Amino acid sequence: MIEFIAQNMAPIMFASLIIFLLIGYPVAFSLAANGLMFFFIGVVLSPYSGGSINLAWPLLHALPDNFYGTRVMSNDTLLAIPFFTFMGIVLERSGMAEDLLDTIGQLFGPIRGGLAYAVIFVGALLAATTGVVAASVIAMGLISLPIMLRYGYDRRVASGVIAASGTLAQIIPPSLVLIVLADQLGRSVGDMYAGALIPGLVLTSIYMLYILIMSIVRPNSMPALPLEARTLGHGVLSLIVALLVAVAASYTAYRYLAPAHGDNADILGAAAGVLFVYVMAIADKRLNINMMSRLAQQVVIVLIPPLALIFLVLGTIFLGIATPTEGGAMGSVGALIMAAAKGRLSLDVIKQALTSTTRLSSFVLFILIGARVFSLTFYGVNGHIWVEHLLTSLPGGEVGFLIGVNILVFVLAFFLDFFELAFIIVPLLAPAADKLGIDLIWFGVLLGVNMQTSFMHPPFGFALFYLRSVAARVPYLDRITGKKIAPVTTGQIYWGAVPFVFIQVIMIGLTIAFPQMVMRYKGAAVEPGSIDIKLPDMPTLSPLGTAPANNGAAPANGGAPAPSGTPDLSQPPNFGDSVPAKPAAPAPDLSQPPKFN
């Protein structure tokens, strides 16, 4: 019996961790306690393991190096997490989400499902600026849910759209989960961001496609805004003209910058065109020129600052100007500037942002420390080999491995959040994926899409909890219409999330079926045969011991011509100077004794 336990320590240890977590013990302490407990057991049972346990007491000395080395305390990659968290919380307090939802809701208001489209669009923008799910869901729940209920939206549709749009912050850069996945997979955060960009936009488009289908199948579930609610009036044509002007200005700037900036000229040209239209809208509003409609003015003025912040963060990363950590620092400064420009930056806001950032960063740090303790013991009992053999032996090869792993992560997401999955499961899966030849950036993005479901499906979906915390629990009187509005039940929130969970599962399948959505981060493939290497022209050199190729002609710099024939290697080289050579010393007379004076 002892031999059986010793030789199967890895699966027993993994099952014990699952039991700890299901009991409800904190994740960080479950990992650390499990690691230390099985370390002591492993050392005692090592003689009975037949060589499958490689643990000894001196191995504990490696823990301080793990804690203070590049994996935890000195990890520059994880430094981006507090920066992006701080940026997201400051932006939430700045009122940016409120302005965006109001303006974009007015823009899409005349069509069925317009408010739902606005929530998805703003959710994608908030994801690209904050990267924090809680901030996005709470902001949109507070602002848009009462408006959607006011104008007759189905409660399940409204709550599902808000919860799902908030989870876009998990896959659209600068997502916190992508930072953690890149660190655990040993890959560049910039590559992970570039790989996740297209899948994130495709997922957003599928959300909008679902709303379009629902607006056709069940038109009464998402009516258009009534005319009296469209306070910004009309003016879509003016907005289209402004967009055309921006495109023309961008193209002109691109043509001007292309000779000097090459491949980066398109991004810089787009930034110049957007800035030109923004300045034009500000001048039009301040000087009362009325060249643009009020709707066009408001859309441009409200939409450009978050787009500028996205460029400040993601644009600098993709251009190679800044690392993700530096991009997060610049984003934090940009968020403070935006909050100050709106007059909403105060000491209280900064205190709240710092408190929340410290709490989340400490949470991540403790989980990571616990994971290092667990992995020290798990690797010592050859747990990584057990997991690798288990996964690589799945039928179907690479596709079978991907399907099995995604089912595992989907099931575990019912009980664990994305940080816990990233620190516990991903380090076990990565070696098997690498052995099968799977690109780890593609694998990481695939897991990132899957981990979104941890926020969405009952019973432990955090996005559902966030929405539940701000949704009305009792009937209330609407302050605009004066009508009595029924509350939103927990069941309605849960059922509203189900269609979007299915959409995320479909997105997992699309990512597996079309890997080029992610692989584009590598750029275009280079054909080795097309590479042409040109060396600069070099003067012709003659072989050693032969006459020079110029046949004794004078050199171009006016120096003395090289002598023809074999050079005298017994003398120091002559570089063309006019100093006469020293005469050779007379041969010594060996018939006389030597003289030392």
Image (cartoon, rainbow, N blue to C red):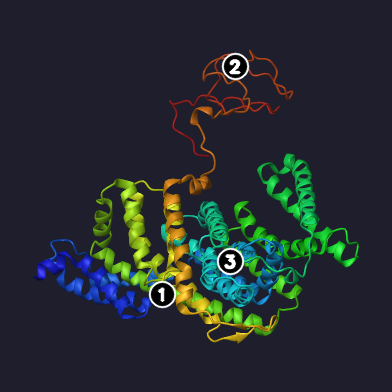
Q: Which residue is mark 1?
A: 460
- Say what secondary structure mark 2 lies in: loop
Q: Quadrant of residue 291?
A: bottom right
In the rendered image, residue 64, in percent from the top left (x then y), is placed at 38, 73
Residue type at tag 1: Phe
How would you rate the neighbour count of disc 2 (Cα within 10 Å): few for under 14, some for 14-19, many for 20 or more? some
Nearer to us of marks 3 and 1 is 3
Badge number at residue 220: 3
Q: In the depicted view, which residue is nearer to us: 28 or 144?
A: 144
Residue type at tag 3: Asn
Q: In the depicted view, which residue is nearer to us: 399 or 39?
A: 399
Q: In the depicted view, which residue is nearer to us: 374 or 441?
A: 441
In the rendered image, residue 454, in percent from the top left (x then y), is placed at 42, 68
User: With 197 as the anchor, is 414 left or right in this view?
Assistant: left
Nearer to us of marks 1 and 2 is 1
Disc nearer the start of the sequence (1/2): 1
Query: Is residue 420 something one can see in this rendering?
Result: yes
